[in-house]
Image (tube, rainbow, N blue to C red):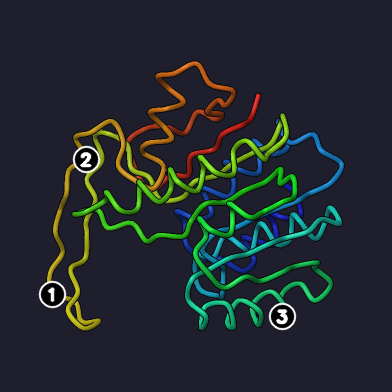
Amino acid sequence: MSKSLEFFKQNINNPIRIKQAEVLDDLLKEHFNFDYVECIETGCSYGGYDDFGTYLGYFTNENNGKLKTVDIVSDSIEKSKIFYGDLFPNLDVEFFCGDSVEYLKSYEGKPNLVHLDSWDLEIPNPLSSMLHGWLEFSIIKDKMPSGSICIIDDNYLNGTTVYWNILNNGNHVKTLPIDITYDIVGKGSLIYHWVKNYDTDWELIGNHYQAGPNIKLILKKK
């Protein structure tokens, strides 16, 4: 177990997120061969029971890297400054408030670790989230060097039943069981199909693509 994963488990109690971190940790040890980290997260981490920035921040800090985080909600950015400042006071982190697609268009670096998680997935109406995920990926993918890792959050594979909570003004109304009958539903749906069905310079890595809880797509640039 890496120090990043150990730290994550000490701070996060969500078993689904812990499993995701375990999968990512193994794949980074096998596939991430850079001597630096230039990390971008879209949809900033700002504290809570499942923030993946707890892993990314430690991994970046441990490798003397740089982290950039972007979110369209200014209050989330302010919370994120506190979150990262408390957990990683020595981390080189920059915060940007605005649309993540526009931010990635103007990005001039060479990121080698990218976590896409900016548009909340709504299982009953997933189109906006999957389109936004594709726009983010399509913009940043060619700026990432060979060997880079891209992670896309919130995906469910065929055969999964998702129990979706319906809320009204923050109050729980009912829980709706939704069967996933497409190959995949989630932020990375279009990315998944692009990589699987076309001759691309990206590949899916890992063996966790199966029915069950929320998974992260993990891609490596060839």
Looking at the image, tell me whether mark 2 or mark 3 is earlier in sequence order: 3
SS class, disc 1: strand
Measured as percent of width and height from the top left, residue 166 is found at: 17, 68
Neighbor class of circle 3 (other Cα within 10 Å; few <14, some 14-19, many 20+) is few
Which residue matches tag 1? 173
Q: Position of residue 116 (x, y in %)?
A: 52, 52
- Does dot 3 land on a helix, a strand or a loop? helix
Mark with earlier residue (1, 2): 1
* As drawn, 156 above or below 62: above
Distance of label 1 from label 2 (alpha carbons): 22 Å
Residue annotated with mark 2: 180
Q: Which residue is mark 3?
A: 86
From mark 1 to mark 3, how far is it between C-alphas?
36 Å
Residue 193 versus residue 87: which sits nearer the camera? 193
Question: Between 27 and 44, which is closer to the camera in this rendering?
Answer: 44
Mark closest to the chain's N terminus, 1 or 3: 3
Disc 2 residue type (three-letter): Ile
Q: Measuring 56% from the left and 75% from the top, which residue is drawn there? A: 47
Q: Which residue is at the front of the view, 144 or 182? A: 144
Residue at figure coordinates x 43%, y 43% from the top left: 134
- Whether residue 151 is situated above or below residue 174 in the rendered picture: above
Residues under numbered marks 2 and 3 in contact, where contact means CB atoms less than 8 Å apart: no
| Mark 2 surroundings: few (<14), some (14-19) or many (≥20) residues within 10 A | some
Q: Report the Cα–Cα distance between label 2 and label 3.
A: 39 Å
Residue lying at 53% horizontally and 58% vertically, measured from the top left: 102
Q: Is residue 30 visible?
A: no
